[in-house]
Amino acid sequence: MITPDKAKVKKANGERLEVSPKTHALVLPEENGFRKMIAYSVNSRWTWVHPDFRGSNGKNDKKKKQKR
């Protein structure tokens, strides 16, 4: 499971916004009239996380090359 890196989010002044009772979004502060989304959560499970803000899940995220 991919989770956001809390240290990077805090450093970028990210905020947690409630979209509905079961969905939340992590967003950056407003700039030029819009906010950039960092991550999206449904039922406490992260469904999407921006690649720049992904935390490690204890596993190697690199894809392994197949031997031919």
Image (cartoon, grey):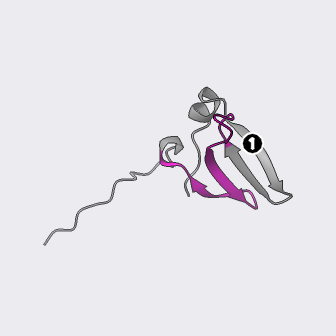
Quadrant of the image containing the C terminus: bottom left
Where residue 22 appears, as percent x and y from the top left, is 81, 60
- Is residue 47 rendered magenta in the image? yes
- Residue at screen point 59% across, 45% down: 4
Name the side, left or right, on which 36 lies relative to 22. Answer: left
Q: Give whichever of 59, 31 is nearer the camera.
A: 31
Q: Residue furthest top?
A: 11
Compared with 30, 25 (above or below) is below
- Is residue 42 rendered magenta in the image? yes
Pointer 1 local density, CA inside 10 Å: few below 14, some 14–19, many at least 20 = some
Quadrant of the image containing the N terminus: bottom right
- Residue at screen point 49% across, 45% down: 56
Looking at the rendering, the stretch of residues picked out in magenta corresponds to 27-51
Q: Give whichever of 53, 64 is nearer the camera.
A: 53
Where residue 12 appears, as percent x and y from the top left, is 60, 30
Q: Residue furthest right?
A: 21
Compared with 67, 61 (above or below) is above
Q: Residue furthest front?
A: 32
Where residue 32 appears, as percent x and y from the top left, is 64, 35
